[in-house]
Image (tube, grey):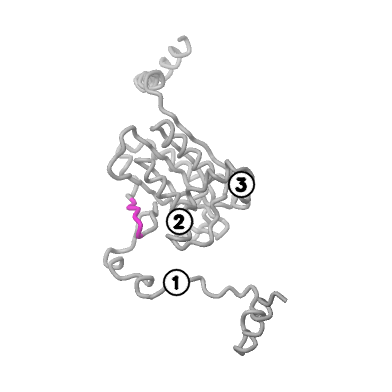
Amino acid sequence: AEKEKAFQAMFPELREEQTEARKVKQKVPILVILGNPPYNAFAGTATTKEERDSVAPYKEGLIKKWGIKKFNLDDLYVRFFRMAERRIAEQTGRGVVSFISNHSWIEEPSFVVLRQHLLQSFDVFWIENLHGNRKISEYAPDGRTSETIFAIPGFSVGIRQGVATSLWVKKTEKTAEPKIHFRDDLNTARAVERRKQLLDSLGIKDFNSYYQFASPSESNRYSFRPSKVSSEYLAWPSLENLTDFKPTLGILENRKEALIDIDKHIIENRMKLYYDPN
């Protein structure tokens, strides 16, 4: 009680906010999951059945429905995404998730089923793409190198992977359509500037005006990034609709000396020798 009085004396403008926050904590319990989950694309397939099963829903239909044959959903942060989704969407029924993570999940094709799951489980999203991907030498429009937000001047250049912050909210009653608020922090290159910009944005009265709205759909693989493609362009048929067969990755030449030749008879002979049980 004494600490609370001292706090209110030091920050009288926060008294009402503190009172309301206390009411929520005591009478309206809301689960909040937040953090910086580890991201390691080379962690490999999970070693335990429980871990493997956790991300299995994000892989369903990737090959048959979406034609995606190469994907990496065994990255550690994906397991944390699934854990958060299960905890809030399937157990508590409402809550908040806030992560700073690898930003690949926002729009890359491999994560289409993951995004579809999140859209079914949560009602509102705020996403801040902070770029900083040094693996591909990202640059700001003015030519400066795009720094990771974890960079500390004179001490550490931070990680190489580009990141994004995201906030997901699940309400007690499901809304008609999920709302995705997205901001592309492309113009700010320095980590110090990025951090300041994030903090300053908290003081914006019309907070949602700070963001663009994304419209995830099956046609754009449920991308969480707002589309810049015109409706006129999307009205044209896709290449897949113009062909008799679905596009393939083409010939894989891993064993080209055995499978490729200019002489048909040579290949036939090789195949006969290969399949001959004797």
Is 42 within the magenta?
A: no
Label 1 and label 3: CA atoms lie apart by 31 Å
Q: Is residue 88 above or below residue 52?
A: above
Give percent across and percent down for residue 121. 39, 41
Rendered view: 45 above or below 245: above
Mark drawn on residue 90: none
- Where disc 2 sits, the SS reads loop
Q: Indicate the quadrant where residue 20 lies.
A: top left
Q: How crowded is the residue under tag 1: few (<14 C-alpha within 10 Å), some, or many (20+)? A: few
Please name the amino acid that badge 1 sits on. Answer: Pro
Quadrant the C terminus occupies: bottom right
Q: Mark 2 packing: few (<14 Cα in 10 Å), some, or many (20+)? A: few
Q: Amino acid at mark 3?
A: Ala
Residue at horizontal 45%, vertical 49%? Answer: 114
Discs 1/2, front: 2
User: What's the residue type where badge 2 is placed?
Assistant: Gly
Residue sitting nearer the eye, 178 or 232: 178
Q: CA distance from mark 2 to mark 3?
A: 20 Å
Considering the image in quadrants, where does the N terminus appear? Answer: top left
Q: What residue lies at 34% left-to-right and 51% top-to-bottom?
A: 214
Are the residues flagged by discs 2 and 3 in contact, CB closer than 8 Å?
no
Near-viewer residue (185 or 267):
267
- Secondary structure type for disc 1: loop
Q: Which residue is mark 1?
A: 247
Q: Which residue is mark 2?
A: 61
On whether residue 218 falls in the magenta region, the answer is: yes
Q: Which mark is residue 46?
A: 3
In the rendering, at what x and y percent does residue 207 appear?
33, 40
Would you call the spot at circle 3 few (<14 residues within 10 Å), some (14-19), or many (20 or more)?
some
Q: Earlier in the sequence, mark 2 or mark 3?
A: 3
Quadrant for residue 217, please give it: bottom left
* Boundaries of the magenta span: 214-219
